[in-house]
Structure formats: structure tokens, C-alpha cells
Image (tube, rainbow, N blue to C red):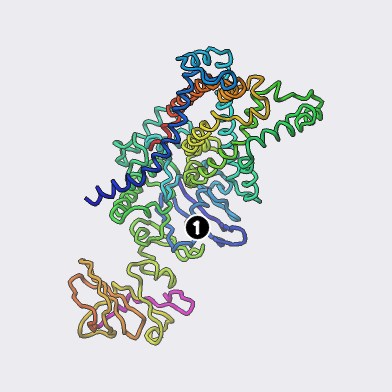
């Protein structure tokens, strides 16, 4: 079981308050992703939950028990670190067995669990190697193995994929998602990569400067961002923001339209501009359009076959039904 | 071709340094070997010709030889034990954030800059003097009989003095090693349920093993040849005559260069045996 509740939790380092009072509930079995730009306090929040940092005020409850003062080892949580934090002088087997040895389990039980974890993670052939002899992805799996043998109430991941190359990252993303499907254990995952957040999460928590900007499922955040920050952070490429008379026409300070919600044409459309850069990805093409009179650049996503080039004048048609409107405070107008 | 040329040019240019260093090493070595086979008594007739292995037999059968080897090994072993254990403890303490860290670290390192002769004199006269020494006063303050350190506990006293000199070196190397430990490893161990003592045993100590190896190897080289500390304190009496000191006595006090040279050759052999054992025991830590 792993229901984690943060109740008015704050964290200050000296005079600097990095986490203002914050309330959050993570339901049992949920895959929750903390996402935000660097320095937004997401890692600090994770370390508060882990117990590696002490909360300044407020309460953390794990399964209804007050865990605020409980030391990390007693919280029943397992953490996977950004650097993997494997013990370099121990074999993979010993690394994975370490938490069990510390818990003084008998050797037969340790062997059983280590073998089980190694099978799940495809590490059976590597059990007698040292971490230094493994590739990045394998090390990552050892770190996850060390976490799952403890059968924790919840897993905490601190940017676990940021040291891997792009291809491996996609693979590990899938493996972690599959692991979650199989174990059904609460997972809290910290990342600055909104793609990871969108693809893996049941629930995304968007953070900025220690504040929760919005909590919701990936599609909720995509469809109904609460404010300009969330609208700009979730979705790739970024949402286009337009201010001025065009926004005023719709009764808003700012309007936002995602690149995928604009259609391009060479002849007709309410907006027009000049293509400055076109990025052909094969499946899609991104046009960066200048001189629209609306914003510095408008990014448009079109089909991969659309072949406008640098300097072409094109016309744009936004989908008015998914146009987001924001008021002067930056909040979305429903 | 170009690499061939530059390689031979490089060899040519390195040659003077290599020849000089080789000579630097070989000339004393060969002279020692040469004298060790001769009867050479500078004040009693000078060079009296070849004597074969007489000097070697005399040196090793002398009643002073095995006690000297034992004293040497006791001092090296004792100092290594004390400096490594206390070095790890001090390094752990110095790694903690504290007020005045910079000054404290300099103070800890300071003994290393004191010359051996000076530090031995300071210890002998200021601390260990049975009448006026600080230790004597301390003992008297508790109503105990002052210890005549250098005569009653001579070997431990020498070990204490030398340890004091070498502790900063060990601390410094071990401190830098501790600072290079990834803090996430300690946090991971903490989350894995390892209390502080087990974190030290399973994470910090294995991480330090390589630095400890370096400390042990380097210190052994210097400790096998300590001399000044013995010369200014006990003069080799009360069981503190090390092999180095014995050789000194043979050459300068007995004025027997042949015998001393034979002792020098034994010292080389002893150093190599110690080095061999050390490499066996700790050298594997340097791999990987």
C-alpha cells in the first residue's frame, strides 16, 4: 500500500523558502510525475518524501501514518537516483541484495528475491559483474532491481533517465511503465522532460518555484491548462501565445494555440506569414513562421508531405474550438 | 618514418637524464656491494682486502640483528596501524562542515612540516621528560607515578612520535578520498536501511581502500628508514635499534664500513620482502 499525503509541507534552506506550503495527495498505485523546469523544487520535494531532507513545517503521511519524523529507511520507500548510486565495489548481485542484507533477511529469501528481480529486469547474466562493467541502461536496471527487491510501498525516481542516450531513454521509459503495470505500486517520478511526463504518468504535478501550478492527468493538462505556464510547459512543440488585438477580439489578454491545431495552406486562411525555418522530421514538418503580425514566431505542425520552404508566404487557419484564452493574470478563461 | 625518427630523437634526448639517474642509483649500490665484501676499517688500517662473505655472516649472526629487524617491523607496523586508523577517523571528522574549517585543516596538517629531528626533540623534552615533561605533570596531577617514556616504554614512544608526524599525511590523502565519494551512494545506502556504522563499513571503507593502499605503500618506504627520531631520543638503546640504526652504528661508531655495507644489503632485502608482502596484501586494491 502506498498512499502518500503531503499536508501543508514547507521547506526552507536558511532564509530561503524553496517549498511554500504545499498540499498533495498521491493515491495508492498511482504513477505520479513531478515535472517542472530546473530549480523548481521537484527534486527537493521528492527528497522530502524520501526523508533525505527534513520538512521545515507540515506533515507527510504514508498510509495514514505520520511519517514526518520517520528516518528514510523506515518509510518503506525505495529510491532510484539520477547517478544510479550503485555501490562500485560490489557485484550486481550484492548491490541488489544490499537492502535485504541490511534488513537481515535469511540467505535463502535473499537469493530468491534477487533471482526474481534479475529475471524481471533481464539481469541474470550480469549478476556477477561489477557496476563498472555495465552499460548505462544495465546500471539503470540494477538500480531499479535494488529498489524492487525491497517490495516498497512506493518507488521514488529522481530523473532516472537523464544520463541515458535518446534511444535508450525511450526503451527504459517503456520498461518502467511496464514495471508499473505489473507491480501496481505507487511510483513518484521526477523529470524536467515533459515528454516523459506525458507518456508515463497517471497524474502529472507541474511545479514552478516550489508551487504546484496544476495537478491532473496528461490529457487534462494538455486540453485544459490552468494557466500560461502549464500551457507553455506541456506539449511539444510549445503552444503559440498571441497577445494584442487578435486576443482582444476573443475577449482575452493572451490566446494560445498549439502548433498541431493550425492548418497551413498556400492560398487561404485568416493569418499569413513567411516561413523562416522548416524542420522535416519525415512524419511531421514543423514550420516556424515569421511576419504574421501576431507574435515573434508562430510554430505550426503539418503533415510530413507538406513541402513549403524558407521564404514561402503561407496562410494559417487555427482551430477555434481548441483555442485557449488567458486573462491578464495568465489564468485560463474556461 | 617520421615517428621512427622522432622516437629515436626522443631516446637520444632522454638519454642524459636516464644515464644520470641510473648512475645516481648504481654507483652507491655497487659501492655498497663492493665494500660489503671487503674488510675496511678506516681508523684501524684502512682497506684490508677481500674477505668473501665474512661481513654478511658476522652481521646476521650478531646478537643485534634479529632484534633490529623486529624493532624495524614493529615501528613500521605500529605507525601504519595508528596513522591509518586515526587518519580515517580524522578525515571523517574533518569532512563534516564546521566553523573554522580552513584553520582546523591547516592545524591538522602542520605536524608534517616539522622536521623529524625537531619534532623528536620537542617530544623528548617537552612531553616525555620524566621530570619536566607535560606527560609527567599530567600523571602527577592524577596522583600517578610519572612514566620515564623513552627508557621504560621506548618503542611505543618512538611509534607515538613517528605516528604524530605521519598522521597528517594519512589524514590528508584519506580526506580527499572521502570528499570524492558520491553523496548519492550514501543516501542510497541510507534508504536501503543501512545505519551510520554500516554505511561506514560497506560504503565509505571500501571507497577508501585505494587511498589506504597508497598511504600504506608510501609510508612504508619512508618508515623503513627512519633515523633522526631514534638518533635524538634513545640513540638506539632500550630495544629501539632498527636495522637502519644498526647499520649507522656499525659504520660510524664501530668504524667498520665492510660490516655496515653488508647490513645495507640486508636492509635492501628486507625492504623488498616487506614490499612484496604489501603488494600481495594491498596491491590488488590498485587494480581496476
Residue B249: quadrant of the picture: top right
Residue drawn at the location 44% of the way across and 42% of the way down = A152
Q: What is the x, y in percent for residue A327?
A: 45, 79
Please give left or right for residue B132 compared with residue A257 in the image. right
Q: Which residues are magenta?
A: A315-334
* Label 1 sits on residue: A24
Percent x, y of residue B164: 63, 35
- Toward the front, the furthest residue is B45
Chain letter for mark 1, please: A
B165 relative to A304 in the view: left or right: right
Above or below residue A234? Residue B33 is above
Please state the horizontal and vertical placement of residue A256, each as a whole percent of the image: 37, 76
Q: Label 1, secondary structure: give it.
A: strand
Depicted B211 relative to depicted A219: above or below: above
Nearest the camera: A104 or B218?
B218
Other residues around mark 1 within 10 Å, as few (<14) / some (14–19) / many (≥20): some
- Say which residue appears at 41% left-offset and 62% top-offset: A216
Position of residue A304 measured from the top left corner of the image (x, y, whole percent)? 20, 70
Residue at position x 49%, y 38% from top?
Answer: B211
Amino acid at each position: 500500500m502506498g498512499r502518500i499525503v503531503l499536508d501543508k509541507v514547507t521547506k526552507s534552506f536558511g532564509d530561503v523558502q524553496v517549498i511554500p506550503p504545499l498540499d498533495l495527495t498521491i493515491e495508492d498505485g498511482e504513477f505520479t510525475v513531478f515535472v517542472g523546469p530546473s530549480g523548481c523544487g521537484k527534486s527537493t520535494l521528492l527528497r522530502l518524501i524520501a526523508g533525505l531532507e527534513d520538512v521545515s513545517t507540515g506533515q507527510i503521511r504514508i498510509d495514514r501514518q505520520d511519517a514526518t519524523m520517520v528516518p528514510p529507511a523506515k518509510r518503506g520507500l525505495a529510491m532510484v537516483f539520477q547517478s544510479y548510486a550503485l555501490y562500485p565495489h560490489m557485484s550486481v548481485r550484492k548491490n541488489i541484495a544490499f537492502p535485504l542484507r541490511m534488513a537481515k533477511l535469511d540467505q535463502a529469501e535473499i537469493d530468491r528475491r534477487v533471482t526474481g528481480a534479475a529475471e524481471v529486469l533481464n539481469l541474470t547474466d550480469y549478476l556477477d559483474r561489477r557496476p563498472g562493467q555495465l552499460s548505462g541502461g544495465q546500471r539503470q536496471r540494477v538500480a531499479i532491481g535494488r529498489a524492487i527487491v525491497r517490495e516498497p510501498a512506493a518507488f521514488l525516481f529522481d530523473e532516472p533517465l537523464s544520463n541515458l542516450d535518446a534511444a535508450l531513454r525511450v526503451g527504459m521509459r517503456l520498461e518502467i511503465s511496464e514495471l508499473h503495470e505489473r507491480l501496481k505500486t505507487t511510483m513518484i517520478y521526477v523529470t524536467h522532460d515533459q515528454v516523459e511526463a506525458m507518456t508515463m504518468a497517471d497524474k502529472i504535478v507541474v511545479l514552478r518555484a516550489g508551487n504546484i501550478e496544476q495537478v491532473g492527468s496528461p490529457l487534462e493538462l494538455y486540453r485544459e491548462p490552468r494557466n500560461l505556464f502549464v500551457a507553455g510547459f506541456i506539449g511539444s512543440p510549445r503552444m503559440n501565445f498571441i497577445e494584442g488585438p487578435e486576443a482582444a477580439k476573443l475577449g482575452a489578454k493572451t490566446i494560445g494555440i498549439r502548433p498541431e491545431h493550425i492548418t497551413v495552406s498556400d492560398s487561404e486562411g485568416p493569418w499569413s506569414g513567411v516561413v523562416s525555418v522548416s524542420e522535416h522530421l519525415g512524419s511531421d514538418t514543423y514550420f516556424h513562421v515569421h511576419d504574421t503580425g501576431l507574435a515573434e514566431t508562430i510554430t505550426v505542425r503539418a503533415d510530413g508531405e507538406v513541402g513549403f520552404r524558407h521564404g514561402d508566404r503561407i496562410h494559417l487557419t487555427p482551430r477555434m474550438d481548441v483555442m485557449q484564452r488567458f486573462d491578464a493574470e495568465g489564468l485560463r478563461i474556461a | 618514418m617520421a615517428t621512427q625518427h622522432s622516437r629515436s630523437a626522443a631516446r637520444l634526448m632522454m638519454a642524459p637524464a636516464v644515464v644520470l639517474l641510473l648512475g645516481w642509483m648504481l654507483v652507491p649500490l655497487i659501492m655498497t656491494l663492493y665494500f660489503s665484501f671487503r674488510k675496511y676499517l678506516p681508523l684501524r688500517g684502512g682497506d684490508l682486502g677481500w674477505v668473501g662473505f665474512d661481513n654478511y655472516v658476522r652481521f646476521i649472526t650478531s646478537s643485534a640483528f634479529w632484534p633490529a629487524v623486529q624493532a624495524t617491523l614493529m615501528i613500521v607496523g605500529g605507525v601504519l596501524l595508528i596513522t591509518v586508523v586515526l587518519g580515517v577517523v580524522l578525515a571523517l571528522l574533518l569532512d563534516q562542515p564546521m566553523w573554522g574549517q580552513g584553520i582546523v585543516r591547516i592545524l591538522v596538517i602542520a605536524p608534517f612540516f616539522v622536521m623529524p629531528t625537531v619534532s623528536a626533540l620537542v617530544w623528548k623534552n617537552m612531553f616525555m621528560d620524566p621530570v619536566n615533561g607535560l606527560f609527567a605533570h599530567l600523571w602527577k596531577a592524577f596522583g600517578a607515578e610519572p612514566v620515564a617514556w623513552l627508557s621504560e616504554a621506548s618503542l611505543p614512544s618512538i611509534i607515538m612520535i613517528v605516528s604524530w608526524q605521519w598522521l597528517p599525511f594519512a589524514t590528508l590523502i584519506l580526506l580527499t578520498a572521502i570528499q570524492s565519494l558520491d553523496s548519492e551512494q550514501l543516501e542510497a545506502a541510507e534508504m536501503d536501511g543501512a545505519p551510520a556504522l554500516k554505511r561506514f563499513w560497506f560504503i565509505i571503507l571500501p571507497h577508501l581502500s585505494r587511498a589506504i593502499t597508497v598511504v600504506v605503500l608510501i609510508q612504508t618506504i619512508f618508515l623503513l628508514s627512519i633515523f633522526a627520531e631514534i638518533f635524538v631520543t634513545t640513540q638506539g638503546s632500550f630495544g629501539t635499534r632498527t636495522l637502519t640504526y644498526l647499520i649507522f652504528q656499525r659504520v660510524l661508531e664501530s668504524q667498520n664500513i665492510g660490516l655496515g655495507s653488508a647490513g645495507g644489503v640486508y636492509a635492501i632485502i628486507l625492504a623488498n620482502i616487506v614490499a612484496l608482502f604489501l603488494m600481495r596484501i594491498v596491491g590488488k586494491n590498485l587494480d581496476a
